[in-house]
Image: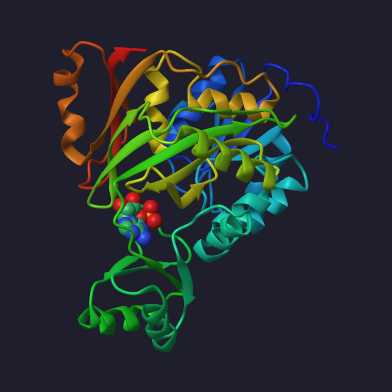
Amino acid sequence: MSRHENNPLPRGSLIGILGGGQLGQMLTMAATRLGYRTHVYAECSDSPGQRTATFKTSAGYNDKAALMQFAHMSDIVTFEFENVPAGTVKSIDDICPVRPKVKALEIIQDRFTEKSFIRDQEIEVTPFMAVSSGAELESAIKTLGLPLVLKTRRFGYDGKGQAMIRDMSDLKAAISDLNTHAAIAEKFIPFEREVSIIGARDIHGNIRTYPLAENDHARHMLAKTIAPAGGNAGLARNIMEKLLDALDYVGVMAVEFFELADESLLVNEIAPRVHNSGHWTQNAGCVDQFELHIRAITGLPLGNITPRFEVEMINLIGRDVLKTSEFASADNVFIHDYGKKEIKPGRKMGHVNRIVRGL
Ligand code: AMP
């Protein structure tokens, strides 16, 4: 049992965060509010997370010396993106507790093991098959039918590493792509809506979940979230609780679903971290997802996370971030600019939360 198993981490303790993106930045801000210090470890320098951290390290995820120094300095370590190498997390965990546990990361890093794990919990998941050759792809087409979505097993996000196979003419390109990637084939789901749930489990096994959020994507990237979004909240909560318990998870987790016409839910994917579709919680009048994560991993009580406002979150992609003064003059709109220097098309630069109404 670790030294922090039963008592909250004392104020002033140092929380190490692997990853320096905007999620890391918002975690440092929540941790700072709670009286903790932070240390962001990222591959590049001047990352958004490093701008707001107490300490920063810029080094590779296989830089043993830098990782050991980071681990020895930290009282607890967490991560803000799921592609941190599992070996890196294991080596840190030998020195300092990492939350959530590496097991969750290992399962979720690979879409095939992730979806198999979900199915093993008797949770409905998008029908899928592992494919690593043209012959396996053809057999997946026979079993699952067309259209199919082909996804790389590892390192896919925001629609990267994905191809749609609508008919046999798409097959050739897909097969040549398979030569470089192990993949899964998924049945194409004609969903009504995409919804997600954010929840957390603390070190004692207590669980809290926010209501479902509805997500609109544009060009495979989250564009807008509105929450609370109605839907089958009870089913979503049960699924979240099952997954958190099965993983003996500590921290915030997100589950994305395809909602069908009868409000049944198929899991699309799990994120073992705070998530873009939970940014609305920052201005919902309750403990937000970032603070919830810090509370969960430090052993603080999770608190009340019932939102008092309906909130619409809009991502600021690329040059959208230059419209800040327009947003600043609107009522009930809260700006979250990550301060990224370089504006690139398709880059998440910030988001705004607009309070729609009181609940
Ligand atoms: P993912 O990276 O798996 O979250 O996929 C990105 C987006 O592609 C999702 O949010 C959906 O809009 C779409 N998508 C992914 N998989 C499927 C599927 N099996 N059926 C229909 N749409 C999908």
- Outermost bottom residue: 135
Position of residue 65 relative to residue 287, above or below, is: below
Q: Nearer the viewer, residue 17 or 124?
A: 124
- Outermost front residue: 262
Percent position (x, y) of residue 310? 33, 19
Q: Nearer the viewer, residue 9 or 119?
A: 119
Position of residue 253 relative to residue 130, above or below, is: above
Position of residue 209 relative to residue 137, above or below, is: above
Q: Nearer the viewer, residue 274 or 30?
A: 274
> Which of the 4 quarters of the picture holds residue 276?
top left
Residue shown at the point (74%, 21%) measured from the top left: 8
Percent position (x, y) of residue 238? 57, 38
Residue shown at the point (15%, 27%) measured from the top left: 323
Percent position (x, y) of residue 19? 50, 43
Position of residue 67 relative to residue 316, above or below, is: below
> Which of the 4 quarters of the picture holds residue 166?
bottom left
245 lies left or right of 267:
right
Residue shown at the point (68%, 47%) measured from the top left: 246
- The quadrant where ligand 1 appears is bottom left
Q: Evaluate whether residue 284 shows in this view.
A: yes
**Quick one: quadrant of the N terminus?**
top right
